[in-house]
C-alpha cells in the first residue's frame, strides 16, 4: 500500500513539473467578435497545448496563407485574444472529392469534344481555396492518357459563350503490368471556382478507370495554450487587420515542437458583421439634392448674364 501511495505521489509530482514547464502566455488585447464575418466554436477540453486544424472553410474564408492569416483570431470568453503560433505542416490535408461523370455544358466544349474524351465534374468543398493539388488514382496498369484539369468560365467580353479554362495538364503513362500505379498529382489554383472539370483523352481505348480523386490542401494548424475555465472561439473574415504580433512567437520552435491535442473547430457560422457604407443613403440623397440646387442656381445666373 505504501508503495502504491509513493508511486501516485511521484506521478502527480511529474505532472506538476510538466505543467509548470509549459509557458502560459497572458491573454492579448480585446477585440469585437462581431466585426468578423465568420465565427466557430472550439471544442472544450483541459488546459494545455492545442493544435487547431485550419480546414477548407477556414482556408477559403480567411485571408489565408498568402497574407499570413492576418484576420484570424482566437478569442476567450471575455473576447480577449489567445496568442497562437501558425504551424505549416509538410504533409497536405487530403479531402476525397465526389466524382461525377458528366459532360460540360455544350457551349463550353472545346474543339476536341468529338474525340474520345471522358469528363468528370469534381465538386470542391468551397470556393476561394488556396493553390492546392489534385491526386488521381486508377486501377489500370498499362496505359497512356492526356489529362487536363479545367475551370468552367462564364461568357465575358472575350468569349460569347462559356468556355473551359485549362489550369493544369500532363500526359499520364504507366507501363509496368506487375506494379501498382502511383497517384497522378497535378497543381491547381481554384481561385473563385466551386468545381473543377477533369478531362481524360482516351484515344482509341476504353475509359481509364478512376478509383479516387483527392484534393490536397496546404496544411496549417494554430498552436496555442488553452487557458483554464474559458470557452474559446475562432473568428476570421476582416480586410482591415494586420497579422497579429504575439510575444508567443518568440517561443515558436518550442510551441510547435510541444506535444499537443489536435482539434478541429466546430461548424462555421456567419457572425452577422455589418459592413457600413462610406455614406448613408439619407446623406447621399441630401448631398445630391443640394448639388442639383446649386447647379440650377449657377445655370440661372449664367442665363441672366447672357440676356
Image (cartoon, helix red, strand yellow):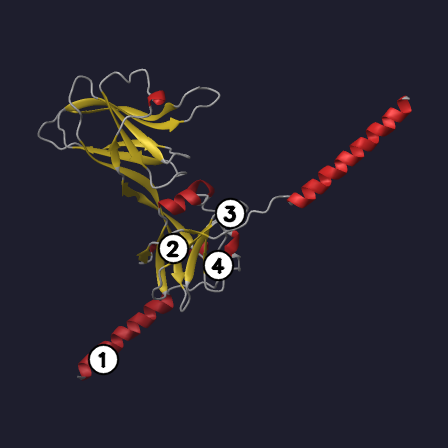
Q: Which of marks 2 and 4 is in front?
A: 4
Placement of the C terminus among the 4 image quadrants: top right
Residues 69 and 140: in front is 140
What mark, if any, has residue 205 been given in the picture?
none
Q: Depth-wise, is mark 2 or mark 1 nearer the camera?
A: 2
Q: In this view, does 116 lie to the left or right of 263?
A: left
Q: Mark 1 or 3, which is nearer the eye?
A: 3
Task: Locate residue 101: give its quadrant.
Answer: top left
Categorize mark 2 by other alpha carbons within 10 Å: few (<14), some (14-19), many (20+): many
**Whether residue 189 is situated above or below residue 68 in the rendered picture:** above
**Element type at marker 2?**
strand
Helix, strand or loop for disc 3: loop
Residue, disc 1 = 6
The reply to whether dot 3 and dot 2 touch (C-beta < 8 Å) is no
Which dot, 3 or 4, sits closer to the camera?
3
Instruction: Find disc 3 in the rendering and name its residue.
Output: 238
Residue 186 coordinates in the image, percent (x, y): 29, 31
Around disc 3, counting alpha carbons within 10 Å, would you say few (fewer than 14), some (14 to 19), or many (20 or more)? some
Q: What element carries label 1?
A: helix
Q: Any mark on residue 223, and which?
A: 2
Which sits in the foreground, 199 or 9? 199
- Measured in 3D between alpha carbons, the distance from the residue under mark 3 to the one under mark 4, in whole angstroms, is 15 Å
- Residue 81 disc label: 4
Q: Where is residue 232 in the image (x, y as percent from the top left)?
A: 42, 61
Amino acid at each position: 500500500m505504501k508503495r502504491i501511495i509513493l508511486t501516485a505521489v511521484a506521478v502527480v509530482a511529474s505532472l506538476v513539473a510538466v505543467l509548470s514547464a509549459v509557458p502560459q502566455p497572458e491573454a492579448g488585447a480585446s477585440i469585437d467578435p462581431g466585426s468578423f464575418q465568420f465565427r466557430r466554436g472550439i471544442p472544450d477540453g483541459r488546459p494545455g497545448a492545442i493544435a487547431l486544424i485550419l480546414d477548407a472553410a477556414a482556408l477559403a474564408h480567411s485571408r489565408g496563407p498568402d497574407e499570413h492569416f492576418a484576420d484570424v483570431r482566437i478569442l476567450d470568453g471575455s473576447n480577449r485574444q489567445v496568442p497562437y503560433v501558425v504551424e505549416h505542416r509538410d504533409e497536405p490535408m487530403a479531402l476525397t472529392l465526389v466524382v461525377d461523370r458528366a459532360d460540360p455544358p455544350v457551349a463550353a466544349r472545346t474543339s476536341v469534344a468529338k474525340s474520345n474524351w471522358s469528363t468528370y465534374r469534381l465538386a470542391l468543398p468551397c470556393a476561394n481555396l488556396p493553390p492546392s493539388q489534385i491526386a488521381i488514382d486508377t486501377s489500370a496498369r498499362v496505359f497512356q492518357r492526356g489529362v487536363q484539369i479545367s475551370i468552367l468560365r462564364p461568357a465575358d467580353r472575350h468569349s460569347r459563350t462559356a468556355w473551359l479554362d485549362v489550369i493544369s495538364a500532363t500526359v499520364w503513362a504507366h507501363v509496368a503490368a506487375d506494379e501498382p500505379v502511383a497517384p497522378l498529382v497535378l497543381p491547381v489554383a481554384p481561385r473563385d471556382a466551386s468545381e473543377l472539370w477533369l478531362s481524360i483523352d482516351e484515344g482509341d481505348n476504353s475509359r481509364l478507370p478512376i478509383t479516387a480523386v483527392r484534393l490536397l490542401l496546404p496544411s496549417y494548424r494554430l498552436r496555442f495554450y488553452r487557458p483554464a475555465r474559458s470557452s474559446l472561439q475562432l473568428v476570421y473574415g476582416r480586410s482591415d487587420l494586420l497579422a497579429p504580433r504575439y510575444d508567443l512567437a518568440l517561443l515558436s520552435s518550442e510551441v510547435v515542437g510541444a506535444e499537443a491535442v489536435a482539434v478541429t473547430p466546430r461548424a462555421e457560422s456567419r457572425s452577422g458583421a455589418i459592413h457600413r457604407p462610406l455614406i448613408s443613403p439619407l446623406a447621399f440623397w441630401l448631398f445630391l439634392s443640394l448639388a442639383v440646387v446649386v447647379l440650377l442656381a449657377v445655370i440661372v445666373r449664367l442665363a441672366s448674364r447672357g440676356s
